[in-house]
Image: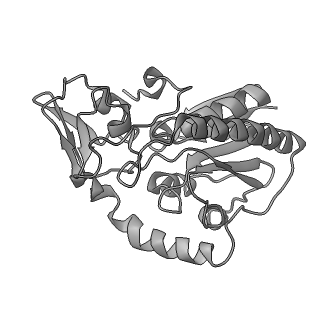
Amino acid sequence: MKTTIYYFSGTGNSLKIARDIAARLGDTTLIPVGKAINEPLDLSADRIGLVFPVYMWGMPDIIARFARRLTVGSDKYLFAVVNYGGFPGATLPSLAKTLKKQGSSLSASFGIKMPGNYIPMYGARPETELKTTFEKASGKVAAIVAAITKGERTKPVSSGFPLDMISSLVYAISMPRIHTMDKSFVVQDTCTSCNICFKICPVDNIKMANGRPVWQGKCEQCMACIQFCPVEAIQYGKKTPGRKRYHNPDVKVAEMMCR
């Protein structure tokens, strides 16, 4: 049985999950949403999957836009896997509603707790805590693959009332301004012009000018640029200097390159 998984990943968590699911399912093609969003979609596989992180207790904007292109017939098994640092909120019920408007149906959905990456609010967690989180995530992936293989159908995973209501409100307030939040990124003189930030941005939001990154106002707040900068020359306002960076240890920077 053929499977296509579309994934969106800033610091590697979603790519790691998508890759692990693909390895267990077999005969699976992985496609980054950043590339697929502007191209014709091949939805001929028997199973279609979406793997992405929770941003501001909801879908990344690029996922919301991509979901509106997913016209999948009832004969397809369409599943989604979200990862989150805190809780999923109403992300998956919202995805299900978006898909329903396109005549599609979310067959099953799952959530996995992973290390958060939103460095404007916090730094990377201690190594012991990360190890425990990864071990639990691995077990969860195995259970998810078993459910997908059986064709199980589930209701959209959520945090329940009142967290769903609160998260929906926060999302509605925050998401309209997310693209221009990149104005808070600054570049220090320690920048080596390595171009990694430019190459790694999944939505082509960074251009290089005089060897320095310049953000273009279409940010997804994935934090790939700041987290993967090898000399920590990128900061977000005044809060991030000295904060420990994070990206998934099983994902190499070369695997995240988009250009």
Residue 112: x percent and y percent? 67, 48
Q: Is residue 73 visible?
A: no
Which residue is found at the position 46% from the left and 52% from the top? 62
Residue 183's spot in the image, x, y percent?
21, 53
Left or right of 153? Residue 247 is left
In the displayed structure, 162 sits above or below 133; it is below
Q: Is residue 189 above or below residue 157?
A: above
Would residue 13 be seen by someone viewing this image from the given angle?
Answer: yes
Residue 80 relative to residue 259: left or right = right
Which of the 4 image quarters holds residue 108? bottom right
Q: In the displayed image of the protein, which residue is found farthest to the right? A: 150
Q: Is residue 59 left or right of residue 175?
A: right
Q: Nearest the camera: 188 or 217?
A: 188
The residue located at (77%, 38%) in the rendering is 139
Q: Residue at x 16, y 29 (%)?
A: 190
Split into 4 quadrants, where in the image is the C terminus?
top left
Q: Nearer the viewer, residue 229 or 258?
A: 229
Tally of numbered discs: 0
- Nearest the viewer among 114 and 155 is 114
| Rendered image coloring scheme | one colour
Is 9 displayed left or right of 199 in the figure?
A: right
Q: Position of residue 48 (x, y in %)?
A: 70, 43
Residue reaching furthest to the left: 210
Q: Position of residue 149 (x, y in %)?
A: 85, 39
> Is 52 located above or below residue 45 in the figure?
below
Residue 115's image quarter?
Answer: top right
Image quarter hosting the N terminus? top right
Q: Quadrant of residue 87?
A: bottom right
- What residue is shown at x 41% (from left), y 26% (from top)? 257
